[in-house]
Amino acid sequence: MPTACINQPDCRVHLKSERLEIFGRNEQTQREGVLREIPLRDLERLIVTESVQITSAAMAALLRANIPVCYLGWNGRFLGGFLPATNQHGLARLHQYERTRDSAFGLTIAGRIIAAKLYNQRRILQRLQASRRNEETEVARTPIQGALDWLDALFAPLSRSAGLDELRGYEGAATARYFQAWASFLPADFPFERRSTRPPLNPVNACISFGATLIYHETVAFCHAHGLDPALGLLHATEDGRWSLALDLMEPFRPVLVEALALDLFSHQILKAESFEAREGGVYLSEPGRKKFFLQYERRMERQFLSEAAAHRTTLRQQLEQQAVLFKAALEQSDRFQPFLMN
């Protein structure tokens, strides 16, 4: 169990020997008791919602075992977390600060990230087009092919970008065109016109936002684990209140994981209208909806595949961590950083 997610409200996490005991109300018997026991040796990260209580002894044991803990708000927003104490990596961070101020380095790395995201968006659309061979898809094939051709033509001007603002402009245009084509594969019951955040205004946006939150948390933890300052961004400008480098490194994974997963959840009716709730002017996954989402998210993150780029079997989670490793190596030699490309 690489990741455990405690989503049920008002649960309590205690430590018993080398195991976590999860106390709460059993939904079938409606009685309080131990819902589950999780050996610490089987756990790599813990995600809990804000109503879950963790004892000091359990938190200390988690940190001692190098297990990060992430807290999510009721709406799925990343609130913060606890990270194991690690070496301060002072020299590596000093070098990172210097390189972050190097405009040529920033443009090079950001350009590779956007090119990888664009490539993965195009691959997602290609796979969707190839896998849907019914009459409805045949009708939609021409506009999808038009989007593929448009995205393909963007690589050349993207490679000649003279600055970060120009890069961001291409990224924004590509993502808008990609989402327009991607949305045509959604079931009619779940329309999607545009991205909306804080709050998400429909179930599709709720899923995309929740998936992005989970990847964001994991990327922040991987940056810290490898001695990087996740606040120092390149593509995403460094600003107070966000982990900009984590946002940079996760960009190529958005099409591969967040949007591909959301589409599967709706197409296979894993998530339905009752999986969502309207709150505070937005639409969010309900508690049962989050359980279903997280189960499928974790399966996808841990599913092994043969990576053509890496030339070995790997998982999306391993590749996400590898982005932090490669970025750190690129601080010494910029060509060491190669963003994730899907097969």
Image (spheres, rainbow, N blue to C red):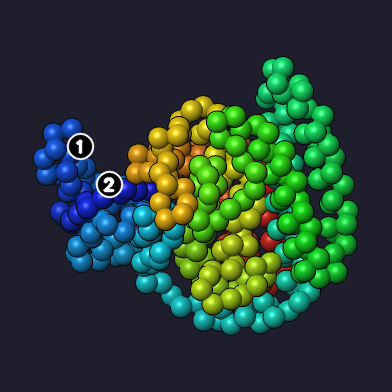
Residues at badges 2 and 1 in contact (C-beta under 8 Å)?
Answer: yes
Graded by Cα atoms within 10 Å as few (under 14), some (14 to 19) or many (20 or more), the crowding at tag 2 reads some
Q: Quadrant of the N terminus?
A: top left
**Nearest the camera: 223 or 242?**
242
Q: Earlier in the sequence, mark 2 or mark 1?
A: 2
Q: How many marks?
A: 2
Q: Quadrant of residue 17?
A: bottom left
Residue tagged 1: 27
Per the image, the residue denoted by label 2 is: 8
Q: Of 220 and 151, which appears nearest the observer? A: 151
Q: Amino acid at mark 1?
A: Glu
Q: Is residue 290 visible?
A: no
User: Which x, y percent locates residue 158?
Assistant: 83, 58
Residue 100 visible in the snapshot: yes
Give the image location of residue 167, x and y in percent: 78, 63
What residue do we see at 41% from left, 72% from top? Answer: 86
Q: Residues within 10 Å of mark 1 (few under 14, many from 20)?
A: few
Residue 145 appears in which quarter of the rendering? Answer: top right
Looking at the figure, which quarter contains the C terminus? top right
Residue 272: x, y in percent?
45, 32
Label 2, secondary structure: give it.
Answer: loop
